[in-house]
Image: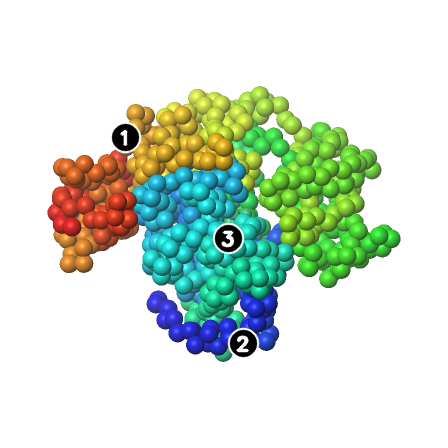
Amino acid sequence: MTVEHPDYTPLVNAALARLGLDAKTRLLAGQDLWSLPALPEIGLESLVMSDGPVGVRGVAWSADDPSLALPSPTALAATWDPELARQAGRVLAQEAHRKGVHVLLAPTVNLHRSPLGGRHFESYSEDPLLTARIGTGYVTGVQESGVAATAKHFVANDAETERFTVDNRVSQRALRELYLAPFEEIIAAAHPWALMSAYNGVNGSTMSEHRDLQVGVLREEWGYDGVVVSDWLAARDTLAAIEGGLDVAMPGPLTVFGPALAAAVRDGRVAEETVDTAVRHVLLLTARLGLLDGAAPVVPEDGRPAPLDGRAVAREIAARSVVLLRNQNRILPLDPAALRSVALIGRAARDARFLGGGSATVYPTRVVSPLEGLREALPDDVALTYATGADPDDQLAVATEGFTLRAVLRDAHGTVLAEQPLTLGRIRWMDSALPGGVDYDALESVEIIGTFTPRDSGTHHFGTGGTGSYRLTVNGTVVYDGADRDGGDPMEVLTGRPVPRGTIDLEAARTVEVSLLHRKPKVSYGPIRGVTFGLSHRDPERDDDQLIEDAVAAASTAGTAIVVVATTERVESEGFDRSDLRLPGRQDELVARVAAANPRTVVVVNAGAPVEMPWREDVAAVLLTWFPGQEGGAALADVLLGLSEPGGRLPTTWPARLEDAPVSRVTPEGGVLPYDEGIFIGYRAWQNHSAAPAYPFGHGLGYTDWTYETIKAHRDTDHTVSVRIEVRNTGARTGREVVQVYLAPAGTHQGIERPERWLAGFASVTAAPGGSAVAEITLPQRGFQIWDDTTASWTTVPGRYTVHAGHGLDTLPLATTVDVTA
Ligand code: BGC
């Protein structure tokens, strides 16, 4: 579907001409956390933005306003399927329309530079081409449905440590060939209507003020005409930000734009034309969205694609993203007719880890756990047992299971102003959006109150999240009464990581009363005002040795053991990086013990980013399910039982041990993080490295076999290269193959430092048993170019190239050559 863009210039200019300076500068500043103000004088409606990659949260960040949760970005990238990414985009646009959201704050197209990056799960790949292709599909799907996508975070926001201030020192070549490349291609191919500037700095300037990149490269070189919005709270200096090419400062109402910008113009410190340029960008965006009077939106309501079934798309992406890393004796797919019994093991098998933490968090109405998925899918005569095995999460989590809660809002006299049922023990209200329209100034206290019916007897742990002054009462006993106030990172204030406050002994199935009274519930962080806190809980600690013994006993008597291992919320999240790649708790020991007890042990790795798997050669099969979204358990059952083929291929190299990873540093020194490795990240670095990874980039098995039969390549007149690859399905079932093409210099290339091989194109094909399929892949000219620092331009490196084709970086059975001239 090609979307025609009308020429909005006359309309935008006319609207601009009718705006005074104050109105213009107001339009460049958030009026609250998520929106820009309406300007009725020019018939402009308020524009609403919302996170984020896996779902559309909406302006209420709460479980009471549920959202569809798709698999996380690493999962989407593992499908290597831009068309599927496009469907994800369409589904999210539907969600955005449902929630009154105009701008989706996604996709995240930063790179997997280090496996320690806290938001690794939230971006696609270590490879710029794969990132660009998935991002293009996603943006296309969102925007052809009439919602703006926001490619973020521009640029080099590849880790979280000191993220507001870190200055990443990146060579021009690495910037161009790696970090800017996905933005460049996505802008050229899919024209995202918005871009988010990063928190970090690059080579000495913080990104929201980076004129060279935000004006020089983005506007002047690439001709970008969308809006550049700050990351939340990243715009800190009126002059530097507006001169540096930032259009919109978020969130509001207090920002460095708005009145501060108007004053700067009046003082003569900023030219009004500079403001006008930014306002034009915003007006163009609102015209595209149909929010500006007289502007027909790019996609009218009746021009949107046919609605998709969001749950079905979530399930399909999840199944297609599963990477089968190992499958000894073809233990998978399991044959339901031959299965007697299955022992399902692991905390995450019951309490699914379906997404990563931070601004990407959404609250779905349902989450299908592996236990539920398998229970539903297995025939009735297969005995399914469940054992926790090892509990990786030794921390408090937001109160949910067994709790029935509501919020009570009171004024200074204790009079109830409003009540609201809660699906979770978590409150996040902005000052302007209190339940029941309660006036923020009148609000004095908020109580989370209700009942709790424990699953297990024993010592239960309770805690609070967010800063403030609390009284916590459980079963008539005051567990905590006190106050604290701190908080640095806004995520800390907004998400409120739980703090333990006390314990109490409770009996299984005996319902007790709970109350968490917040006496000073109003918080502010910069311009953000609101109420954000929560009640957290943890089940009684169980004897870990006993848990493992129980799981081993269950595994040893079952026909097949399936162990689900996972990271926790405190391992993978926005706001902090990881310190190691180990599975938390005693999960490694659990897998080793179960595998020793049952040779038919299948391990399901439920993590958004690489983890060490020291037992990987000792188990029958290893499946990687990423953070699979709300339908993950159903998709896992589809894959285990062979209804779906595990279609995923690694979008990132999987190290055996952290210390093997060629690039891992995420901690700045003196505020500076040097990207000393230059263009050698991911597989580009592993190729010249002493250690071998556990699994290479592109790896992933299917349920059938493929032979690579023929390859032909020729150079086209437009400097691209066309490659034709014929493959045959030599296995016993219909399958899907991701045909990958890598380029390598053949002979000398003027001594230019380049990776050994690099991904230059890919395509998926399907074929029935015995059938053949042809992949036609066009390799872009960029594949043959490098960024030349001396001329500050792209240069084709002439010479002979080997064109390799195959199943993954380590399995490239076909090759041909192509000669390229400058
Ligand atoms: C994140 C952005 C996000 C924004 C709004 C920031 O902390 O870095 O990705 O869009 O918050 O939630």
Q: Tag 1: Cα neighbours inside 10 Å, few (<14), some, or many (≥20)?
A: few
Q: What residue is shown at x 43% (from left), y 40% (from top)? A: 168
SS class, disc 1: loop
Residue 710 visible somewhere in the drawing: no
Q: Is 697 situated above or below 192?
A: above
SS class, disc 2: loop
Quarter occupied by residue 127: top left
Give the residue number, with chain letter if any, for mark 3: 240
The CA distance from mark 3 to mark 1 is 41 Å
Amino acid type at mark 1: Asn
Give how far across and how far down residue 24 sits, in percent: 55, 67
Give the residue number, with chain letter if any, for mark 1: 688
Q: Which callout, 3 or 2, points at the residue further toward the start of the chain?
A: 2
The CA distance from mark 3 to mark 2 is 27 Å
Residue 432 visible somewhere in the drawing: yes
- 9 on left or right of 160: left
Give how far across and how far down residue 309 sits, in percent: 47, 60
Mark 3 and mark 1 in contact? Answer it, CB < 8 Å.
no
Quarter occupied by residue 9: bottom left
Give the residue number, with chain letter if any, for mark 2: 18
Disc number lying in front (3 or 1):
3
